[in-house]
Image (tube, rainbow, N blue to C red):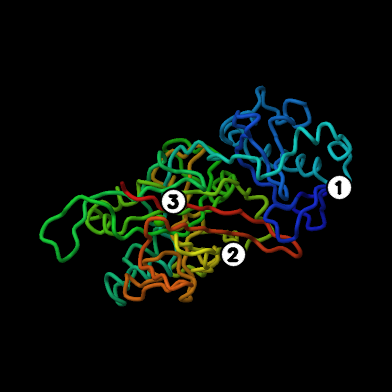
């Protein structure tokens, strides 16, 4: 049987070369329809969704589990079956969708029930998020922020090149693309004020990140090897770590971000598997000084993954691109983040979500937050039509896209969108 990543594979479903969802991708999501409101697992193929719960109930898709895993409101039951089952299932779905395989192709009645237009599917949060941790692993982002607030000579904190820095975020407010984001309220104390006040955030920002979806378990007290951490990564999503810069500035000493980051984190609805990203693996930046032995890596664990951010204000007809960068610039890899996360004895669970940290590249147009794009408000962003932005205003819609470019096809993530609603 051909490998599901084979660039030559074709589906009997026509897929545009510019589509994010060719047969080489097969990302998992959770959906429902108006006619059938039960949440269930599906796979995106071209502009269609393949209903895995239906295929499982018809006996065409077997995972070896005693109970069904796809007629569920999240991917967690499927993820808990482990990486061998993930691979076998993906290979079987690929087979069922191939243009030279008759089982589904030639069964019109089944096809009619198992495939539906993506526009008719309501997409839900794909995972039950067990825990959410946000890293800070782009050297360019950490340097930009450091230069702004501490000057060029002290840009990186002394620990940064040794530890994948992170804080524990909130799983409870991870939401799927399309969910409105209400402007947070909080304690604000501008440098010019004598005392703090409570009110709507005035410096609301986005952070362009990738999210790692953990599909395995590491017991409390145990460390992870590079290979174990790798095997636990089920897939990736686009992630917007909405940030209230003014709340953060006042609250973060000495324990780090709290309310500034806890009000919303948006993710894309389709989880692209680690396996689908294999062909796009690249070596990350050289790490100097060499990390401590437990963080050293043998494998190339970055991905050549293009990222694009666009913004549409309520006055604009179309969104305008405001940043283009690449996941490959990340200094600390997702595997190193996961190894470090477990290194103190922290248990990791199925459904844990790890934010990569804001992804900025070396160039000015590759910055992954408005804080950096407007250089802390000193260089306002000018948008087509004359609107200017230093931070996000009510009614602004922010869209992130990501994809790996193959030869004649792309393995993409779709998008994560969020519109800002007034604090009320
Ligand atoms: Ca972040």
Rendered-image quadrant of the N terminus? top right
At label 3, counting other C-alpha atoms closer than 10 Å, the crowd grade (few under 14, some 14-19, many 20 or more) is: many
Residue identifier under label 3: 340
Percent x, y of residue 397: 47, 57
Residue ID at (57%, 50%)? 236
At label 1, counting other C-alpha atoms closer than 10 Å, the crowd grade (few under 14, some 14-19, many 20 or more) is: some
Cα–Cα span, label 3 and label 2: 26 Å
Residue identifier under label 1: 99
- Ligand 1 visible in quadrant: bottom left
Residue 205 occupies quadrant: bottom left
Residue 394 occupies quadrant: bottom left
Percent x, y of residue 67: 65, 23
Cα–Cα span, label 1 and label 3: 43 Å
- Helix or strand or loop: what does disc 3 sit on? helix
- Helix or strand or loop: what does disc 2 sit on? strand
Residue 95 occupies quadrant: top right
Residue identifier under label 2: 306
Task: Say which label, 1 or 2, has the lower sequence index.
Answer: 1
Task: Say which label, 3 or 2, has the lower sequence index.
Answer: 2
Task: Say which label, 1 or 3, has the lower sequence index.
Answer: 1
């Amino acid at each position: 049987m051909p490998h599901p990543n084979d660039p030559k594979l074709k589906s009997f479903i026509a897929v545009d070369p510019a589509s994010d969802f060719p047969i080489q991708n097969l990302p998992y999501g959770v959906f429902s329809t108006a006619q059938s409101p039960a949440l269930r697992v599906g796979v995106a193929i071209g502009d269609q969704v393949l209903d895995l719960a239906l295929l499982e109930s018809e006996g065409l898709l077997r995972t070896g589990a005693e109970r069904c895993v796809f007629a569920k409101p999240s991917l967690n039951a499927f993820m808990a079956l482990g990486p061998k089952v993930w691979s076998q299932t993906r290979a079987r779905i690929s087979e069922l969708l191939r243009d030279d395989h008759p089982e589904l192709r030639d069964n019109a009645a089944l096809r009619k029930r198992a495939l539906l237009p993506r526009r008719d599917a309501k997409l839900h949060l794909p995972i039950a998020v067990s825990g959410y941790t946000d890293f800070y692993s782009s050297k360019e982002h950490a340097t930009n922020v450091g230069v702004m607030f501490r000057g060029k000579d002290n840009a990186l904190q002394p620990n940064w090149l040794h530890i994948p820095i992170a804080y524990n975020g909130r799983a409870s407010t991870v939401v799927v693309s399309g969910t409105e984001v209400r402007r947070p309220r909080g304690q604000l104390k501008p440098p010019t004020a004598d005392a703090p006040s409570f009110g709507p955030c005035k410096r609301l920002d986005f952070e362009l990140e990738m999210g790692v979806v953990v599909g395995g378990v590491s017991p409390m007290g145990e460390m992870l090897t590079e290979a174990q951490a790798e095997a636990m990564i089920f897939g990736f999503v686009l992630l917007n770590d909405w940030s209230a810069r003014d709340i953060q500035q006042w609250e973060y000493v000495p324990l780090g971000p709290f309310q500034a980051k806890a009000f919303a984190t948006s993710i894309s609805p389709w989880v692209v598997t680690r396996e689908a990203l294999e062909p796009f693996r690249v070596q990350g930046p050289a790490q100097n000084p060499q990390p401590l032995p437990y963080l050293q890596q043998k494998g190339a664990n970055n991905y050549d993954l293009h990222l694009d951010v666009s913004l549409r204000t309520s006055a604009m007809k179309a969104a305008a691109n405001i940043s283009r960068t690449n996941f490959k610039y990340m200094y600390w890899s997702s595997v190193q983040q996961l190894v470090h996360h477990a290194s103190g004895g922290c248990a990791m669970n199925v459904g844990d979500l790890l934010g990569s940290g804001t992804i900025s590249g070396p160039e000015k147009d590759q910055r992954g937050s408005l804080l950096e794009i407007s250089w802390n408000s000193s260089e306002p962003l000018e948008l087509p039509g004359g609107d200017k932005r230093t931070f996000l205003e009510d009614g602004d819609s922010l869209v992130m896209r990501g994809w790996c470019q193959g030869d004649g096809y792309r393995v993409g993530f779709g998008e994560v969108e969020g519109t800002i609603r007034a604090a009320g």
